[in-house]
Amino acid sequence: MKKILLLLTLSALASAQPKLPRPAPALNLLSPCKGRPTVLAWIVTTCPHCKAFTHSVLEPEYESGRVCAVAIAFDDEGDTAKFAREQGLTFPVYKLSREVMRAFMGMTGPDRPVGTPQVAIIDKHGIIQAQSEPAGSPILQRRVIIDSILEAMK
Amino acid sequence: MIAVKIPMSVLMWLYVQKIFFVHVVPLLVGLTVAAVYPVGNRVAAKAGAAFWRVMLMSALGPALMLEGWRLAVRSPWTPLAYGLGYGLGAALLSRVHTLRLWPPKIITRRGAQAARRSA
């Protein structure tokens, strides 16, 4: 019985992990990024890691002109204009619901708390080549890793 | 989750940094605090020590401890690493007979014993 429960738990966990690479779900906001490598960050406007990531990683990547950078806030109360102004962001910061974020990131199963920012790196063909785990992936918040992924996607 | 191949050296460097900050730093903080607390107290307890010297030397240990906690990346490993570092520092200091801050000089208990025997 214990073995069966363990197998069920493991299979549930395995199925909860989105498969990669996979085509990015259609999102109107991303249409200006068509044909370009894109770094998309799902953020919460009050999250310190999201502030650090958008300001110190995403903004320089965007300024370098190598990627199309997009941040989308999925917190209901978030003020995206204030967030962009405070972080000095020159790329667009949009707002969508948590459900859209979950669908985009391929999160299935019960709606558990997620680690933010949720980062997705999409190649020029619209395929997600890297993305954060539902619990968050600090490694995908490092510029050196993002640079390596962009290099490998060329 | 990354589908493309990225250089192993980049990942290794990140893991080395992680090990240093998550596992080694708390240990070093514990060790330093264990060493600095008694040294500060010893100086502070010296007869006729100036008021400000006593105050500053006594403040060194607690300040260093809190600075360590401010800097350390906290994880379930942190208390154990800090404790081990503190224990190591206390064990090392228990072997010290005399400690001179300036010019720096450490005389171990064994060294002091040998000096007494030869005298």
Image (spheres, coloured by chain):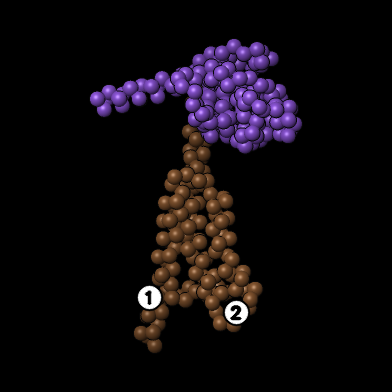
Seen in the image, is A74 located left or right of residue B105? right
Residue A61 pos. (x, y %): 66, 29
Q: Quadrant of the C terminus of chain B?
A: bottom left
Q: Is residue A148 above or below residue B39?
A: above
Amino acid marked by disc 2: Ala
CB atoms of marks 1 and 2 within 8 Å: no
Which residue occupies the foreground of this view, B35 or B17? Answer: B35
Q: Residue at x 57, y 33 (%)?
A: A141
Q: Is residue A150 above or below residue B51?
A: above
Image quarter for residue B44? bottom right
Q: Which residue is mark 1?
A: B110
Q: Which chain is purple?
A: A
Which secondary structure, mark 1?
helix
Which secondary structure, mark 2?
loop
Amino acid marked by disc 1: Arg
Q: Residue at x 40, y 71 (%)?
A: B95
Residue furthest to the front in view is A77
Q: Residue at x 58, y 60 (%)?
A: B63
Seen in the image, is A6 located left or right of residue B39? left
Q: Which chain is brown?
A: B
